[in-house]
Image: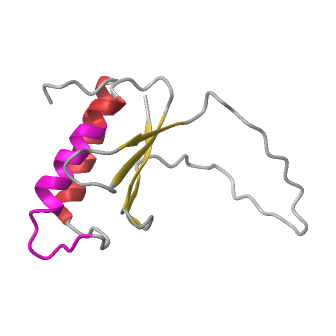
Amino acid sequence: MVVFSVYVVNKAGGLVYQYDNYSPRSDAEKTFSFPLDLVLKVHDERVVVAFGQRDGIRGIKFIVLADPRQAGIDSLLRKIYEIYSDFALKNPFYSLEMPIRCELFEQNLKAALEVAEKAGTFGTGS
């Protein structure tokens, strides 16, 4: 199962953190010419957007883009909030509403996403 991206949005609606976990590799370079002949189609079963807001901090949104078969997204959102509160909010150099630039936050987020993907679920014991 795959978690594609994680976003953290502040209460003003600004993006304070973005992590792209999965990027498909293309084998060939694609070139485009003008005008682009694009056709957009809706694929309901491709990506699920999960929104989460924890009670401790009003207005902060944690957004996860994941495969619809990925189970345990609510637990993953709780774990991301826990990582945010432990490594970003407790960092003396981090200011609320500002972009998150904490190396420990990113390392622990990557580890949590790796656990979630390997298990297919993100259990409460992690």
| Residue 61 included in the magenta stretch of the image | no
Q: Which quadrant holds residue 125?
A: top left
Point 37% across, 62% down: residue:
11
Nearer-the-camera pick, 108 or 77: 77
Question: Does 14 sit left or right of 100 as displayed?
Answer: right
Q: Which quadrant holds residue 84?
A: bottom left
Judge whether 124 appears above or below 95 on screen. Answer: above
The N terminus lies in which quarter of the figure?
top left
Point 20% across, 74% down: residue:
95
Judge whether 14 appears above or below 49 on screen. Answer: below
Residue 30 x %, y %: 74, 58
Nearer-the-camera pick, 50 or 36: 50
Residue 121 x %, y %: 31, 24
In the rendered view, how is the structure colored?
A: secondary structure
Point 27% across, 28% down: residue:
122
Magenta stretch prevailing secondary structure: helix
Judge whether 2 appears above or below 111 on screen. Answer: above
Residue 68 x %, y %: 51, 27
The C terminus lies in which quarter of the figure?
top left
Q: How many marks?
A: 0
Q: Which quadrant holds residue 97?
A: bottom left
The residue stretch that appears in magenta:
77-96
Point 20% across, 58% down: residue:
105
| Residue 87 included in the magenta stretch of the image | yes
Residue 21 x %, y %: 40, 48
Question: Does 96 sit left or right of 8 as displayed?
Answer: left
